[in-house]
Image (cartoon, rainbow, N blue to C red):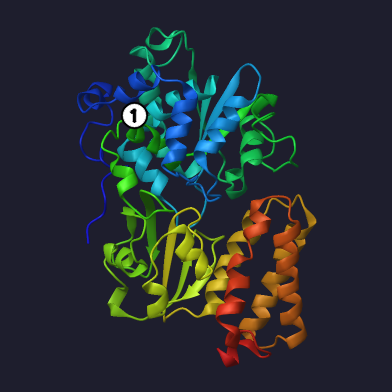
């Protein structure tokens, strides 16, 4: 099986440091077309292709753009979330590295659709090596008249800014990301007000993921409706996935929705040493887990098919764990990440992560009691229902799903029964 080429069609086809090279393969043709259209028609095109947000929440992107357009207010803002702090997830990195001008073009189109005056790309600290690449793309786009005032003579003004975070996973959450750009501590805030009404600097704001935005120029030029012909009826088109763990060739791949999980793993060279897959986690560290059975591996990668077996698309990460790692050790590793990344602002997440880490250590040592196992599950449920932001709400997805999939592991004495 070979990876698809829709979103990644430009990869390797132009010099990523040269806007002229990008324009030679049709770059900014989509923007030229977009500014002749009504913004609502562009949002409708995205909705017709059933594009769901690629950052993890899977919200209808066309609907999101229509809602953002409808908000009254001046100096609207577009934000590109390039934080990508989810472990196992690195597909946005490839879109930035191999097609930076497409992302810039997508941001300008989004600004036109929403009537925004400013765009912000918020990039994770660990991607500092790509700052010069994006800064150069922004500078060249401005010199060619694609950024600034009266873009393409349409009376449309738009500026683009590049910001880097400080390496906090929680800043992938919209309100924490906004506070970080504002120079405040990157901690989530209560909603409402929703950011589409009062976001960055209290201005109406629309926030999208790198992959979500990067699709837009391609969709505008898809006269043959190739995107809609790929995937399934409910999960249209393609998805960027990043496959990591115990595979021979970890990497990011564009696949049509409906591809079986085993075929996606094959793209990454299969499992190291031909070993048995004991566990899969989809959607990054906050994703749910499943056993590596034939039934699971034969599941098509779609929103609906994955949901039927208790998994989610999430951020597009696929972690493959072979038989060398126990379920308990995997959960301990995952919990270490969330204990480190918790911002400490809300009680359920701050205290819950501490106690669950302790319970997992007792499970590993074989000293946990049945009562403590029940308490651990209860704390995880409280976190998922009452935490302030998505970090706390999803931090125990792996634990709760593992308790369902691998009940034999969660018995008094723990490791002795695994």
Residue 135 or residue 47, whichever sits in front:
47
To which residue does mark 1 refer? 101
Residue 94, placed above or below residue 376: above
Whether residue 81 is visible, yes or no, is no
Q: Residue furthest right?
A: 347
Residue 102 or residue 57, whichever sits in front:
57
User: Residue 253 location, x and y as percent?
Assistant: 32, 53
Name the residue located 33 percent from the left edge and 80 percent from the top edge: 275
Residue 330 or residue 282, whichever sits in front:
282
| Quarter where residue 203 is shown | top right
Name the residue located 42 percent from the left edge and 74 percent from the top edge: 296
SS class, disc 1: helix
Residue 192 or residue 171, whichever sits in front:
192
Q: Is residue 352 left or right of residue 314?
A: right
Mark 1: few/some/many CA within 10 Å (<14, 14-19, 20+)? many
Name the residue located 52 percent from the left edge and 64 percent from the top edge: 307
Q: Quadrant of the N terminus?
A: bottom left
């Amino acid at each position: 099986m070979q990876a698809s080429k829709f979103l990644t069609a430009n990869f390797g086809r132009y010099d990523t440091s040269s806007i002229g090279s990008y324009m030679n393969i049709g770059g900014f043709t989509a923007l030229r077309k977009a500014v002749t259209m009504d913004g609502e028609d562009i949002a409708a095109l995205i909705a017709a292709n059933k594009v769901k947000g690629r950052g993890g929440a899977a919200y209808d992107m066309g609907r999101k753009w229509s809602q953002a357009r409808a908000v009254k207010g001046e100096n609207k803002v577009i934000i590109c979330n390039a934080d990508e702090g989810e472990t196992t997830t690195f597909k946005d990195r490839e879109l930035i590295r191999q097609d930076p001008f497409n992302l810039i073009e997508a941001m300008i189109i989004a600004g036109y659709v929403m009537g925004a005056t400013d765009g912000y790309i918020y990039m994770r600290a660990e991607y500092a090596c790509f700052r010069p690449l994006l800064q150069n793309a922004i500078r060249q786009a401005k010199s060619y008249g694609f950024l600034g005032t009266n873009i393409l003579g349409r009376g449309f003004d738009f500026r683009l800014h590049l910001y880097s975070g400080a390496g906090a996973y929680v800043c992938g959450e919209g309100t924490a990301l906004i506070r970080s750009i504002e120079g405040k501590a990157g901690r989530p805030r209560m909603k409402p007000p929703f950011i589409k009404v009062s976001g960055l600097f209290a201005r109406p704001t629309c926030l999208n993921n790198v992959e979500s935005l990067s699709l837009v120029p391609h969709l505008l030029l898809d006269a043959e409706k190739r995107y809609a012909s790929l995937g399934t009826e409910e999960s249209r088109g393609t998805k960027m996935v990043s496959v990591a763990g115990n595979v021979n060739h970890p990497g990011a791949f564009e696949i049509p929705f409906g591809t079986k999980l085993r075929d996606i793993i094959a793209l990454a060279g299969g499992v190291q040493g031909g070993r048995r897959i004991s566990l899969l986690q989809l959607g990054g560290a906050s994703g749910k887990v499943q056993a590596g059975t034939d039934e699971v591996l034969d599941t098509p990668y779609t929103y609906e098919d994955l949901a039927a077996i208790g998994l989610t698309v999430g951020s597009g990460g696929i972690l493959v764990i072979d038989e060398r790692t126990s379920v308990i050790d995997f959960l301990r590793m995952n919990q270490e990440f969330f204990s480190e990344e918790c911002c400490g602002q809300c009680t359920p997440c701050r205290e819950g992560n501490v106690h669950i880490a302790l319970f997992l250590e007792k499970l590993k040592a074989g000293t946990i009691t049945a009562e403590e196992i029940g308490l651990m599950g209860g704390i995880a449920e409280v976190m998922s229902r009452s935490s302030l932001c998505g970090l706390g709400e999803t931090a125990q997805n792996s634990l709760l799903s593992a308790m369902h999939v691998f009940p034999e592991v969660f018995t008094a004495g723990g490791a002795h029964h695994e």
